[in-house]
Image: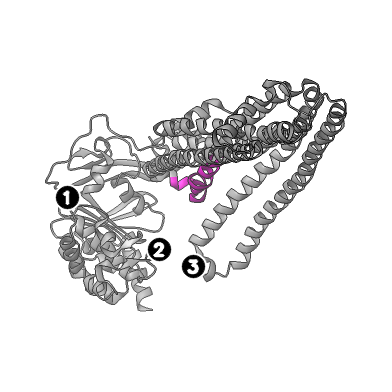
Amino acid sequence: MTDATMSGPAASQEPRRMRGAFDDDVYGKSLDLAQVARLLHWMRPYRGMAFASLFLVLLGAVSAIVAPMVLNRVLIDGIVLKHNGPALSNLGLEAVNHWLATQFRVAPLIAACIQYMFWILVSAALNRGFGILFGRATLNTLRDLRCDLFAHLERLPSSFYDRVAVGRVMTRVANDVETLFELFAGFGTLAGQMVPFFVAITVMLTLSPTMTFELLPVLPVAGFFTWFFRRMSRPLYRAIRMTVSRLNENLQENLSGIEVVQLYGREKMNFARYSAINDENRVNENRALTIESFYGPLIDGMNYAGNAIIIWFGGHLVMHQEMTVGTLLLFTQFLSMLFMPIVAMGEQWNVVFRAMASGERIFQALDWNEALKEPAHPTPLPPDLHGKVEFRHLDFAYIPEHQILKDVSFTINPGERIAIVGPTGSGKTTLIRLVCRFYDVPDASIFLDNIDIMQIKPSDIRQRIGVVLQDFHIFSGSVYDNIALNDPRITREVAERAAKLVHADPFIRALPQGYDTPLNERGRNLSHGQRQLLAFARVLAMNPEVLVLDEATASIDTETELVIQDALKKLTEGRTSVIIAHRLQTIRDAHRIVVLTEGKVREIGTHEELIARGGLYRTLYELQFQETAL
């Protein structure tokens, strides 16, 4: 149940807790294996592809070790200098080279070159295969995760989006999922570097235990500096992530309201706010860049120090014939294989923390269980709905401290045309949002054909109630797509008939491609009045038993409004209709008028009855009449 239906002290605290929980950014999360396991749930359909890719990276890593062994132990030591070590020191590669030379009748030097090129190509091919397979498994996994997240966000009720900024939700779908891709890619990179690390150490111990033990102390020192610098940069990357989220939110807010921004000349003010956040991001980026500029040379220096140790001690061993030249050169090549995983782990450490935070935010959205109350045993609506709507002592509040509707009671009879009027903030729009079940209401407070709407599935209600809002939403697609909304019942013929009834057909056929004309974002290539006519056609096409018009003609000029009045009369004839309007002259022919103020029903009657009564309605009508006369 949503927070809108709660009451009491506990309910008062719950919306704040829920609102704050989602709005708070999650940063600096530690490695959570349970969260990683949950992420892998989306990879289960592609686990065969993932395991195959890991097998390829293992083979590729071994190939990367074998290639320099051929170059240094077989070619340099065995062929050029003719100084072979123990049989284990070349892993049998010398025997393979001898077999190649004999089999193909070539010189040992050519056989060594062939063998070296073979292992290089095998390593490259295996690594490429790993990249393709693992990349596809990862992309498919994140695609499914993004689709599940999007589907879940679509199911969240309106009350959720009343509290949570859309820009923050968009960050979870776009940026946070992209960060998870970096996490999976990083794991793949580490897998490809850790295998050569252990194989290289094993081979180095086989070739020269003395040299290996002289070199190993450099590794923990490099690991310590990596840990130290990553610890320093970790809060900076958290701050960078936070400012990027704020930049996205600020950008979405300003671009979605660009007309208001330009109308009131807020460009400089909004630019100053955006620039302030951007400057904060720049400062943190520069600090992180400074740390990286020290870290990179330091690690390079450690690598040079390791090479110096190899040359110094290895040179003495070579001079005393305790080590071959090829082995010395092999140690210098293996050194990079020892440092690369350490550096990669340092880099991936920040990625892991960012990914854990992103995963936390994604799962926070997926686990957000705010939903409309679904009846355990829903009551189906009859095929022929009469359209009777009844309010019985309805109380409602978006937040418990601020009551919107108070003890609202009245009945709309089948086929009756009811107008709801009242000052701004009196609860008119809230009333129709409750009828459409965008929020939960107390049991036995709203009835549709004598059925408590809390016992009806919300989706069933919305299929039988048509709503025309003042702000009509246009989806990307053609004019016909925006009328049918992918409803198989609304054929092209049905859509055109509905458009003709509301007089939208002439302007639609005047468009370049008629009903197949693609509409720009938010229907910018249509006038406001045309968008409203399209809204009428959309509702007419679905043929609802109950019709709700919320300021539906407020943005239509007087001439256009006169044109569609006849269509509206035909539309509402024999159909239960609820009309909310500020312009009271448009509802004079309503069967009854309900006057709301401060969330309470003050007056009910026909236009003539309410005028004769001399109450609030007459006051509102006379004020509007005076404004029109002026």
Which numbered circle lies on residue 521? 2
The answer to which quarter of the image holds residue 266 is bottom right
Q: Quadrant of the C terminus?
A: bottom left
Where 620 falls versus 353 (above or below)?
Answer: below
Q: Please, what is the three-letter code of the amino acid marked with disc 2?
A: Glu
Quick one: SS at disc 1? loop
User: Viewer-proximal residue, 92 or 46?
Assistant: 92
Where 218 falls versus 88 (above or below)?
Answer: below
Quick one: SS at disc 3? helix
Residue bearing mark 3: 259
Can you tell which of label 1 and label 3 is closer to the viewer? 3
Q: Residue at x 40, y 43 (%)?
A: 147
Quick one: SS at disc 2? helix
Q: Is residue 498 left or right of residue 134?
A: left
- Separation of marks 2 and 3 at Cα, in angstroms: 14 Å
Q: Is residue 237 magenta?
A: no
- Separation of marks 2 and 1 at Cα, in angstroms: 39 Å
Can you tell which of label 2 and label 3 is closer to the viewer? 2
Task: Measuring from the top left, give residue 104's x and y in whole percent.
Answer: 55, 36
Pick whichever of labels 2 and 3 is earlier in the sequence.
3
Q: Is residue 13 left or right of residue 501?
A: right
**CB under 8 Å between discs 2 and 3:** no
> Is residue 551 visible from the viewing direction of this image?
no
Residue bearing mark 1: 413
Q: Is residue 162 magenta?
A: yes
Q: Please, what is the three-letter code of the amino acid marked with disc 3?
A: Glu
Q: Is residue 556 left or right of residue 210?
A: left
